[in-house]
Image (cartoon, rainbow, N blue to C red):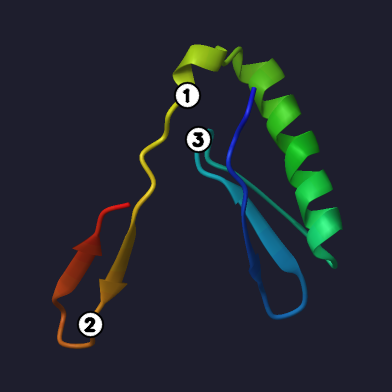
Amino acid sequence: MKLTAIIKKGEKQYVALCPEVDVVSQGYTIETALANLKEAVELHIEVMHIEESKTENPFITSFEVIPNGKTTTAVG
């Protein structure tokens, strides 16, 4: 099963998110955050009995928030 990992630098640790299954983990290095995320996702999928077909082809986009409250969406 191929999934997405989004990793950001937090105040003290890296935070890793898998958007397909809404699981988050963290670690002091990118590698540790990713390893922790993988373990958390594996446990989540096992416990929740998630099928591979329910995680395929996520729609990923980006958007920008402008201080005056309007948003702009960029598809792709």
Image coordinates of residue 66 in percent, x first then y, are 22, 82
Looking at the picture, which amino acid does disc 3 mark? Glu
**Which sits earlier in the primary sequence, circle 3 or circle 2?**
3
Label 1 neighbourhood size at 10 Å, few (<14), some (14-19), many (20+)?
few
Amino acid type of disc 1?
Glu
Amino acid type assigned to the residue bearing label 2 in the image? Ile
Which label belongs to residue 20?
3
Q: CA distance from mark 3 to mark 2?
A: 27 Å
Q: Is residue 6 left or right of residue 28?
A: left
Element assignment for label 2: loop
Pick whichever, 47 or 68, lies toward us: 68
Relative to 37, does residue 33 appear above or below in the rendering? below
What residue is shown at x 49% (from left), y 24% (from top)?
55
Callout 1: SS: loop
**Secondary-structure class at tag 3:** loop
> Residue 10: x, y in percent?
67, 74
| Residue tagged 1 | 56
N-term-proximal mark, 3 vs 1: 3
Determine which residue is flagged by label 2.
66
Residue at the image position 13 percent from the left and 76 percent from the top: 70
Q: Among all residues in the image, which is located at the extreme bottom?
A: 67
21 or 48, which is in the foreground? 21
Picture disc at residue 8:
none
Give the vertical position of 73 relative to 36 (above or below). below
Q: Nearer the viewer, residue 33 or 56?
A: 56
Q: Residues within 10 Å of mark 3 (few under 14, many from 20)?
A: some
In percent of width and height, residue 15 lies at 67, 62
Q: Mark 1–mark 2 contact, CB under 8 Å? A: no
User: Looking at the image, is mark 1 or mark 2 earlier in the sequence?
Assistant: 1
Q: Nearer the viewer, mark 3 or mark 1?
A: 1
Place residue 48 in its image quadrant: top right
